[in-house]
């Protein structure tokens, strides 16, 4: 790129990403990144493998990517891979990389196709890649498969929104060309959070699988559903090629030949294909980091000052200080409230993949069991009315007695009677002062 400082931007953000992942939090800092979204079988995995030039991602039916995969590509002479959760171990066999991704996924989510927002950090060093960081997210689905929870569609959608709603996140929307672009899951969810198309980069896959006589020229020329950053077409390996272990380099050569020979794409050939996509993403992510760097630096400085202030407070910390204990107790209560709310809303880090729990279980009981339980109740209407009548009378307590005495006092015919009732009323008020009231009472009690 010619500018060494610009080239170092992506590795710098990678270090920040690793640091925050190691401590299990993001420090409320939104790092510049590219999130890959798309429906199942849209070709996301093939695009990422073409970048690396190796088969290393799990494949199969249903949801294969069940945790976010933070893929950091680093241009390097030697070729190997490292995971953040087993740092220090170098993977030179990319079949072992795939096995480790599957094992680490099952460790958190189990083997029943559940999902989790806890990411896996993978760094790949290779001479065939440009510096680039991508977050591969689970493919969007509409139907639960096997032991998946019935609300799997909403769980995946919520996970995607956690990433792509951030202004610092670029969106790589992957859509197959052999489906209607207007119904693209990737473009639909991208448009929700980026209605002007300023952060979205469109990728059109499976161009070679379109019906004969049709093409995606209008899409690739950015005339249909235009995006500020445009669309790039790619041709991935077919399932037959993958099963046959077709070399990715040969596949890239076939992709190049396809664009040069196709009459509808020949004039766009220099702006199509996997190498151009990788170069474009490298440039756009670098520029995006450069643009967001001032705000990122400001946030870091603000958080650093806040942390230094907390550290200063703890320099004179005394374990027996009652104010410290009170503050710690309040923080624990507040954290419990936050954790409880997350549990009810189903937005916590730990997702139960075995059975319904928390708010989902309450919701099911209320909507599915409660109406049936109400129907089962057998009651005597006459007895129920009697109980309600007694309940109403008991609620008013002694207030009605005072009102009756007050009425007798107002209507007494003789002076002696008047004097007698006044004494009774005075004594009654003195004995029942806290509960007496001159307010009107609807229920007539028998005294």
Image (cartoon, rainbow, N blue to C red):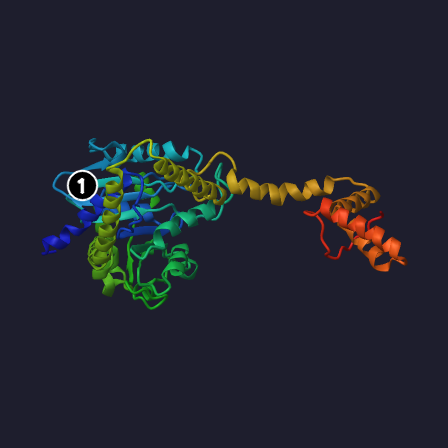
Query: Where's residue 330, x and y in %?
Result: 41, 40
Reply above or below: 326 against 305.
above
Residue at (40% x, 37% y) in the render = 329
Q: Quadrant of the N terminus?
A: bottom left
Residue that label 1 marks: 125
Q: 108 left or right of 393? A: left
Residue at (49% x, 37% y) in the render = 146
Name the foreground residue: 61 vs 445: 445
Name the foreground residue: 278 vs 179: 278
Name the foreground residue: 324 vs 275: 324
Residue 47 appears anywhere in the view? yes
Dot 1: within a 10 Å radius of its alpha carbon, few (fewer than 14), some, or many (20 or more) residues?
A: many
Considering every residue shown, the one lying at the far right of the view is: 413
Reply above or below: 110 against 443.
above
Name the foreground residue: 86 vs 258: 86
Query: Where's residue 202, x and y in %?
Result: 32, 58
Residue at (23% x, 55% y) in the render = 298
Query: Where's residue 188, x and y in %?
Result: 41, 58
């Amino acid at each position: 790129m010619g500018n060494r400082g610009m080239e170092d931007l992506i590795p710098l953000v990678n270090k920040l990403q690793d640091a925050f992942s190691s401590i299990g939090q993001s420090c409320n800092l939104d790092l510049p990144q590219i999130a890959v979204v798309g429906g199942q079988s849209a070709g996301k995995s093939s695009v990422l493998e073409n970048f690396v030039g190796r088969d290393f991602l799990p494949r199969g039916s249903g949801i294969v990517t069940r945790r976010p995969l933070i893929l950091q590509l680093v241009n390097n002479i030697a070729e190997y891979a490292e995971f953040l959760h087993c740092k220090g171990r170098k993977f030179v066999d990319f079949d072992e990389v795939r096995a480790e991704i599957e094992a680490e996924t099952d460790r958190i989510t189990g083997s029943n196709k559940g999902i989790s927002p806890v990411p896996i950090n993978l760094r790949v060093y290779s001479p065939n890649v440009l510096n680039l960081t991508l977050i591969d997210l689970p493919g969007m689905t509409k139907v639960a498969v096997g032991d998946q929870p019935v609300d799997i569609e909403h769980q995946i959608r919520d996970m995607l929104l956690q990433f792509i709603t951030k202004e610092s996140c670029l969106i790589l929307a992957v859509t197959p060309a052999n489906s209607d672009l207007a119904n693209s899951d990737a473009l639909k969810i991208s448009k929700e959070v980026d209605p002007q198309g300023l952060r979205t980069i469109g990728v059109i896959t499976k161009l070679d699988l379109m019906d004969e006589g049709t093409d995606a020229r209008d899409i690739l020329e950015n005339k249909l559903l235009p995006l500020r950053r445009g669309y790039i077409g790619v041709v991935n390996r077919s399932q037959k090629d993958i099963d046959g272990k077709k070399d990715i380099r040969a596949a890239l050569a076939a992709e190049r030949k396809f664009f040069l020979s196709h009459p509808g794409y020949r004039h766009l050939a220099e702006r199509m294909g996997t190498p151009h996509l990788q170069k474009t993403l490298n440039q756009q992510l670098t520029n995006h980091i450069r643009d967001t760097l001032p705000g990122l630096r400001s946030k870091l400085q603000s958080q650093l000052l806040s942390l230094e202030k907390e550290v200063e407070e703890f320099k004179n910390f005394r374990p027996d200080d009652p104010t410290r204990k009170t503050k710690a107790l309040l923080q624990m209560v507040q954290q419990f409230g936050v954790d409880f709310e997350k549990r009810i809303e189903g937005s916590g880090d730990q997702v139960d993949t075995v059975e319904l729990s928390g708010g989902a279980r309450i919701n099911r009981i209320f909507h599915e069991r409660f109406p049936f339980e109400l129907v089962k109740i057998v009651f005597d209407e006459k007895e129920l009315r009697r109980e309600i009548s007694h309940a109403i009378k008991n609620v008013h307590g002694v207030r009605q007695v005072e009102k009756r005495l007050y009425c007798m006092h107002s209507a007494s015919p003789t002076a002696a009677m008047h004097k007698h009732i006044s004494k009774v009323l005075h004594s009654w008020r003195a004995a029942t002062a806290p509960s007496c009231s001159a307010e009107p009472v609807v229920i007539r009690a028998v005294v």
